[in-house]
Amino acid sequence: MSKICVVVVSGSIERLQMAAMVASVAAVSGHETLVFLSMNALPHFVKGNEVTAPAEGEMGELMSKKKVPQFKTLFEQAVELGEARLYPCSMAMDVLDVGQGDLEGYLGEATGLTKFLDDAGNSQVWTF
């Protein structure tokens, strides 16, 4: 199978949800899946942070009403059920002043963008 890499920088519910769907489907389909969480996405993975991701439009609002599986659940399932690895951005962690222990337990070790792109190699890279 191929390798799929997902870069998540947005904090909007639609983009977080789509990134999680791509990662989870890729992982459970047998693809090696790498996810890089940075910028406005990373605060949603800090333990105890209950900030709701804002909707960009109608779809985001409808997803909340329809009770679709939350993006964090899909990312966690991608790790548990497939070949997904989620990496928090070390620079974003520094900016947010959070340590590895402050993040959800299913996230891997912090990494930098240079290392992530090197690991991505010639794979497909999706950005949300």
Image (spheres, helix red, strand yellow):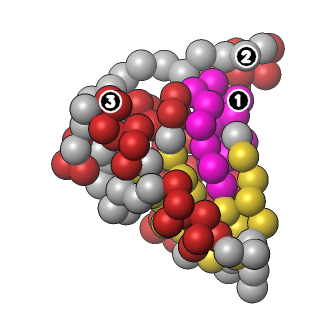
Q: Nearer the viewer, mark 2 or mark 3?
A: 3
Do labels 1 and 3 touch, CB within 8 Å? no
* Numbered badge on residue 56: 2
Question: Which SS class for mark 1?
Answer: helix
| Residue in the image at 67% along x and 16% along y | 55
Q: Which residue is mark 1?
A: 14
Q: Tag 3: residue type?
A: Leu
* Residue toward you, 25 or 120: 120
| Residue in the image at 25% along x and 32% along y | 97
| Residue in the image at 62% along x and 31% along y | 10
Q: Tag 1: residue type?
A: Glu
Which residue ends up furthest to the front in the rendered image? Answer: 114
Q: Earlier in the sequence, mark 1 or mark 3?
A: 1
Which residue ends up furthest to the bottom in the rendered image? Answer: 1
Q: Would you say 42 lies left or right of 106 here?
A: right
Do labels 2 and 1 touch, CB within 8 Å? yes
* Numbered badge on residue 96: 3
> Magenta region: which residues?
6-21
Residue 81 visible in the snapshot:
yes
Disc 1 versus disc 3: distance between alpha carbons?
23 Å
Disc 2 versus disc 1: distance between alpha carbons?
7 Å
